[in-house]
Image (cartoon, helix red, strand yellow):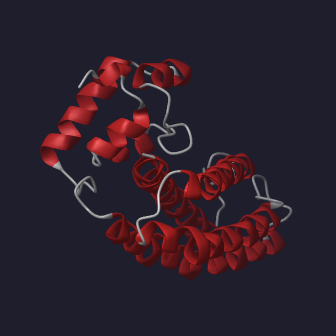
């Protein structure tokens, strides 16, 4: 593989361990997965050769599961049980924690004012998104339906994935890139740790759909 000139989403699909490197350097491999590694490194001001070395090291020391040889039904089941259920479990408590931090620490420097409202908007849209996938698109993919019949549902889901990316960027903006101030309390710390985990899981989730599952249906 000519790694530097390969779309970052393809690298993530073929070498799943690479997502740890991409997350570490805040490189978008889900919604921005069609850009080459060289392009995303240039945009982020990173040394592409160093990133390639990190990818090779990660693959050698911590290989992870590839979905290339799994069926679409297996991948759908994994997405629902792993990512959809995690979101349903984790996001409502994060909203509650955000409201508490805003209420208690509103007068403190670095308080994430407005975060709870952004999370609430994100969660409302995400619940609708997951419902459409689980009730409409995923049953079609499980049944092996491909091509023109799933073209529009897939495009709609991809567009909504882009909107999720906008929400993630807004969360980063409101939280100062998820950096805790020195006076942060335990709830504030737990909130930001939870948001980091949610961001990483959501990017893995969107990557599996955009770069692995949906292309199969388009063939």
User: Is residue 81 shown left or right of residue 69?
Assistant: right
Residue 129 picture location, percent across and down? 66, 67
Q: Please count the marks in the image.
A: 0
| Residue at position x 50%, y 39% in the image | 26
User: Is residue 2 shown left or right of residue 88?
Assistant: left
| Residue at position x 78%, y 68% in the image | 116
Q: Residue furthest front?
A: 148
User: Is residue 55 shown left or right of residue 46?
Assistant: left
The image quadrant that residue 93 belongs to is: bottom right
| Residue at position x 83%, y 61% in the image | 114
Residue 185 picture location, percent across and down? 63, 69
Q: Closest to the observer: 80 or 176?
A: 80
Relative to 14, does residue 171 appear above or below in the rendering? below
The image quadrant that residue 78 belongs to is: bottom left
Image quadrant in which the N terminus is located: top left
Image quadrant in which the C terminus is located: top left
Residue 188 picture location, percent across and down? 64, 67
Relative to 194, does residue 163 appear above or below in the rendering? above
User: Is residue 174 shown left or right of residue 168?
Assistant: right
The image quadrant that residue 112 belongs to is: bottom right
Q: Closest to the observer: 30 or 182?
A: 30
Q: Residue furthest left?
A: 60
Q: Closest to the observer: 7 or 104?
A: 7
């Amino acid at each position: 593989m000519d790694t530097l000139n390969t779309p970052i989403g393809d690298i993530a699909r073929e070498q799943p361990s690479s997502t740890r490197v991409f997350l570490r350097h805040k490189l978008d491999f889900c919604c921005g997965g069609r850009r080459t590694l060289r392009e995303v490194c240039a945009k982020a001001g990173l040394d592409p050769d160093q990133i390639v070395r990190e990818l090779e090291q990660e693959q050698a020391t911590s290989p992870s599961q590839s979905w290339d040889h799994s069926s679409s039904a297996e991948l759908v089941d994994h997405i629902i049980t792993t990512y959809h259920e995690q979101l349903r479990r984790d996001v409502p408590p994060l909203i509650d924690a955000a409201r508490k931090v805003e209420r208690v620490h509103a007068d403190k420097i670095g308080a994430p004012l407005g975060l709870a409202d952004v999370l609430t908007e994100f969660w409302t849209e995400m619940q609708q998104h997951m419902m459409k996938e689980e009730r409409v698109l995923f049953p079609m993919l499980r049944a092996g339906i491909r091509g023109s019949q799933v073209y529009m549902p897939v495009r709609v889901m991809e567009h909504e994935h882009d909107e999720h990316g906008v929400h993630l960027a807004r969360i980063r903006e409101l939280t100062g890139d998820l950096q805790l101030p020195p006076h942060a309390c335990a709830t504030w710390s737990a909130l930001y740790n939870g948001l980091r985990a949610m961001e990483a899981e959501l990017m893995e989730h969107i990557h599996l759909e955009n770069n692995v599952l949906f292309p199969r249906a388009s063939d």
